[in-house]
Image: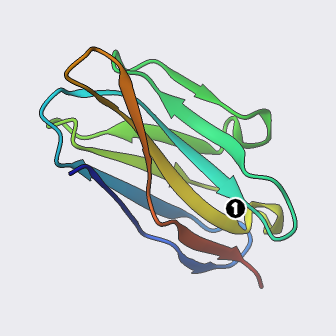
Amino acid sequence: QEHVVESGGGLVQPGGSLRLSCAASGNRFGIHGRAWYRQAPGKQRELVAFISREGDTNYAYSVQGRFTVSRDNTENTIFLQMNNLIPEDTAVYYCYVEFGTSDNRYLGVWGQGTLVTVNA
């Protein structure tokens, strides 16, 4: 059974920093792409950052230069370093993981989300 668990959210003042973590487990066929999404109150969920199996990254325009997605050496955990936070970054942040399957397909699994609030 695949599991995705986020952590690291909280309350931070504008200009501050937070680092989110996303731990993936329970799969025998490897992990492909992973991404961070966010959903602000009353808005649709949007892609924030993506990291491929090869380590290539992409970012939403609104976070370029402020957010960095990375992974640990075991490749089981990815991180989202968020710097220079602004109130518009307030949202529930979700981790999305593409697990491999026995028939060479992808199984997408969402985490439960972690709340980030940027407020003075």
Which of the 4 image quadrants contains residue 76? top left
Q: Give the residue at x 82% y 62%.
A: 88
> Please, is residue 40 above or below residue 115 in the view?
above
Question: What's the amino acid at mark 1?
Answer: Leu
Residue shown at the point (74%, 71%) measured from the top left: 14
Q: Is 18 in front, or is 108? A: 108
**x%, y% of residue 39?**
72, 59
Q: Secondary structure at mark 1?
A: loop
Q: Is residue 15 left or right of residue 81?
A: right
Mark 1 crowd level (few <14, some 14–19, many ≥20, 10 Å Cα): many
Residue sitting at x 44%, y 58%? 111
What is the quadrant of the C terminus in the image? bottom right
Tell how many labels.
Answer: 1
Where 4 sits versus 28, above or below?
A: below
Q: Is residue 7 left or right of residue 120?
A: left
**Residue 19, percent across and down?**
45, 60
Measured along the vertical axis of the image, is residue 5 above or below residue 46?
below
The residue at the far right in this view is 42
Q: Position of residue 25 (x, y in %)?
A: 20, 49
Q: Is residue 36 above or below residue 99?
A: below
> Is residue 29 toward the left or the right of residue 35 in the image?
left
Observer-nearest of 48 and 81: 48
Q: Quadrant of residue 78?
A: top left
Picture coordinates of residue 20 (x, y %)? 45, 60
User: How was the colour assigned to the protein in this rendering?
Assistant: rainbow
Place residue 4 in its image quadrant: bottom left
Q: Which residue is mark 1?
A: 85
